[in-house]
């Protein structure tokens, strides 16, 4: 399935020097739910190409840190950001925080990860949910009590059932489909605030 990607958000991202139009999804989420604060320590799971890193690095300021982990090669365009650390690794194999060069857990976990899509809706939904479940399983290790989560989910009945079961671990639990999500896309975002492991 091919997208007409050169829409308003594509051109806006180009003009504002962001690496991808997906930055506007995070911006809208953050403006609405106040996820990212100055001096936060944040991990962006599957960060490639890196527009969320660009946004986050700006928002947390020089005393914060954003760690990006992705199985893809490190994106050199982000290496000029002094409060960013990038790792080429499978986040689901990380045993401890030291592997990411940090001591404490993170204030925020971000995940815009999606599976390699097949175009077969049922298969893509299952693959997406597998990723989502794996990210939730990392939270006790990665996310500070009181921390925030933003994660991409592909809409499905099974996803709704799973998310309901996770709601109790957060003080607030919201769903949002940002304006910049393409109309053909089945994705939405879950925003969890005040993590209670």
Image (cartoon, helix red, strand yellow):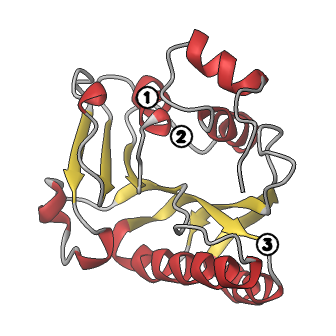
Q: Nearer the viewer, residue 124 or 167?
A: 124
Residue 197 visible, this orientation = no
How far, Cα to Cα, is label 2 from label 1? 13 Å
Mark 1 crowd level (few <14, some 14–19, many ≥20, 10 Å Cα): many
Q: According to the image, label 3 marks what residue?
A: 155
Instruction: Say which residue label 1 marks.
Output: 54
Q: Residue furthest right?
A: 183
**Residue under circle 2?**
36
Tag in front: 2 or 1:
1
Residue at 77% x, 45% y: name it. Answer: 181
Q: Is residue 34 left or right of residue 93?
A: right
The image quadrant that residue 71 belongs to is: bottom left
Marks 3/2: CA–CA distance: 25 Å
Q: Position of residue 192 (x, y in %)?
A: 65, 63
Q: Secondary structure at mark 1?
A: helix
Assign a secondary structure to mark 2.
loop
Q: Is residue 129 left or right of residue 44?
A: right
Mark earlier in primary sequence (3, 1) = 1
Q: Can see residue 82?
A: yes
Q: Nearer the viewer, residue 61 or 6?
A: 6
**Badge 3 element:** loop
């Amino acid at each position: 399935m091919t997208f007409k990607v050169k829409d308003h958000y594509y051109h806006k991202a180009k003009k504002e020097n962001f690496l991808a139009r997906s930055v506007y999804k995070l911006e809208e989420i953050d403006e609405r739910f106040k996820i990212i604060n100055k001096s936060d320590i944040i991990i962006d799971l599957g960060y490639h190409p890196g527009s969320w890193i660009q946004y986050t690095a700006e928002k947390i300021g020089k005393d914060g840190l954003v760690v990006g982990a992705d199985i893809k090669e490190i994106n050199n365009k982000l290496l000029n950001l002094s409060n960013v650390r990038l790792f080429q690794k499978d986040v689901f194999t990380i045993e401890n925080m030291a592997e990411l060069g940090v001591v404490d857990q993170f204030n925020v976990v971000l995940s815009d990860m999606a599976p390699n899509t097949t175009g077969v809706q049922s298969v893509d939904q299952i693959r997406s949910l597998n990723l989502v479940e794996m990210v939730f399983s990392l939270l006790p290790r990665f996310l500070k009590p009181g921390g925030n989560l933003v994660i991409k989910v592909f809409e499905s009945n099974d996803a709704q059932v799973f998310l309901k079961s996770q709601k109790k671990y957060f003080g607030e639990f919201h769903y949002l489909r940002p304006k910049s999500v393409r109309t053909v896309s089945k994705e939405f975002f879950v925003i969890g605030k005040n993590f209670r492991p």
